[in-house]
């Protein structure tokens, strides 16, 4: 008999976190990641959420005031997010999970 386990891994504001890895100037400031064609906000940093920016909010409504409130926007980069997700899952986390279940 084998035991089966299910793990749920959630990285807070993952798209923003991935963008911050390659652009440290985004740390500790409000950041949104935009949908295809930069239409609306599909991911927000906690700082952006604290400003009250909701999921799906249209970028054209924020763009004029972005500089005033220190808001940075990035176009979505799904290749980057897929690669970063694979790295998180395949390396550190799964190795640690394996060690936890072996012990």
Image (cartoon, grey):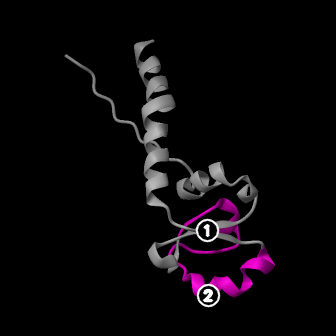
Residue that protrudes farthest toward the top in the picture: 103
Residue drawn where x is 75% and y is 57% of the image: 25
For mark 2, give the secondary structure: helix
Whether residue 102 is situated above or below residue 27 in the rendered picture:
above
The quadrant the N terminus occupies is top left
Magenta region, residue range? 42-69
Residue for point 61% across, 68% down: 32
Q: Is residue 90 above or below residue 51?
A: above
Label placed on residue 32: 1
Is 86 positioned to the left or the right of 5 in the image? right
Q: Which quarter of the image is occupied by the C terminus?
A: top left
Left or right of 33: which side holds 99? left
Distance from the alpha carbon under mark 1 to that under mark 2: 13 Å
Assess whether mark 2 and mark 1 are in contact (beta carbons under 8 angstroms): no
Name the residue: 48% across, 72% down: 35
Q: How busy is the neighbourhood of tag 2: few (under 14 within 10 Å), some, or many (20 plus)?
A: few
Kind of element beneath mark 1: strand
Left or right, 28 with reference to 73: right
- Residue under the image location 47 percent in, 30 percent down: 91
Snapshot quadrant of residue 97: top left
Where residue 79 appears, as percent x and y from the top left, is 44, 55
Q: Give the quadrant of residue 15.
A: bottom right
């Amino acid at each position: 008999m084998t035991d089966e386990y299910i793990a749920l891994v959630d990285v807070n504001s993952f798209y923003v976190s991935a963008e911050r890895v390659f652009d440290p100037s985004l740390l500790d400031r409000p950041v949104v990641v935009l949908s295809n064609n930069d239409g609306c906000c599909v991911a927000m940093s906690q700082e952006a959420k604290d400003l009250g920016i909701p999921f799906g909010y249209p970028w054209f409504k924020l763009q004029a005031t972005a500089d005033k409130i220190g808001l940075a926007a990035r176009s979505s980069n799904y290749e980057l997010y897929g690669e970063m997700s694979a790295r998180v899952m395949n390396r550190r986390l799964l190795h640690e999970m394996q060690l936890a279940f072996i012990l």
